[in-house]
Amino acid sequence: MVDIGKLNKRITFLRPVQARDSLGQDRLSYEPHVTVWATVKPYKSNDRSLMGKKSPEVSHKFYVRYRRDLAADMRITYRGRDFAIIGEPVDIDERHELLEIQAEALV
C-alpha cells in the first residue's frame, strides 16, 4: 500500500524531443511531460568499474505512483536541478502501485 502522505515533493518528468536547428542538424532537447507528487531520497552510491567502464553514480531515488508513461530516456526536474534516469523505473513488488526511479544529478 502506498503511503500518499510521503509523496510530498513535486517533480517534473521531461521527455526527449528531436528537433532540427537552423543549420539542419538534429538537436536533442527535453520538454515537460508530466508533473507528479513524489518522495525524494538523496542517495549516494559508489562509482563502480564494470569491465573497465565507470557506471553512473546514483545520487537520488524518486518514488512516484505507478505510471506506464515513464521511461529511462527521460529526465527529472526537482527544485531547479535536472537528473538523468538510470535504468528503467522499477515497479515495487510488481503491484502497480509505486515506482522507484534511480537518477544521477546532472552538472
Image (cartoon, rainbow, N blue to C red):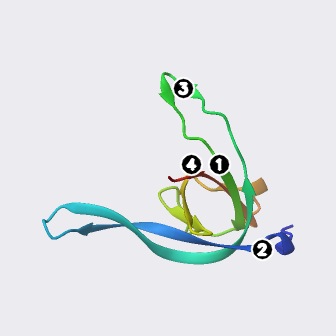
Residue at 78% in and 74% down = 8
Residue contact between numbered discs 1 and 2, judged by CB atoms under 8 Å: no
Circle 3 SS class: strand
Q: Disc 1 to disc 3, how far (Cα)? A: 18 Å
Using the image, tell me which numbered label, if any, was put on residue 20.
none
Q: Amino acid at mark 2?
A: Asn
Kindly check if marks 4 and 2 are in contact, taking CB atoms under 8 A apart as contact.
Answer: no
Q: Position of 60 compared to 106: left or right?
A: right
Q: Are marks 3 and 2 in contact (CB under 8 Å)?
A: no
Q: Which residue is mark 1?
A: 59
Q: Mark 3 vs mark 2: which is more N-terminal? A: 2
Q: Earlier in the sequence, mark 1 or mark 2?
A: 2
* Mark 2 residue element: loop
Q: Which residue is mark 2?
A: 8
The residue at which mark 4 appears reads as 87
Q: CA distance from mark 1 to mark 4?
A: 13 Å
Amino acid type indicated by mark 4: Gly
Q: CA distance from mark 4 to mark 2?
A: 24 Å
Q: Nearer the viewer, residue 103 or 66?
A: 103
Q: Earlier in the sequence, mark 1 or mark 3?
A: 3
Per the image, label 4 sits on a secondary structure element best described as: loop
Front residue (pair 32, 100): 32
Mark closest to the chain's N terminus, 3 or 4: 3
Residue 75 position within the rendered picture, expressed as x and y whole percent measured from the top left: 51, 62
Ranked by sequence position, the earlier of labels 4 and 2 is 2
Q: Spatial distance from mark 3 to mark 2, Cα to Cα? A: 36 Å
Counting from the top left corner in percent of width and height, residue 37 is at: 71, 75
The numbered mark at residue 50 is 3
Mark with earlier residue (1, 4): 1
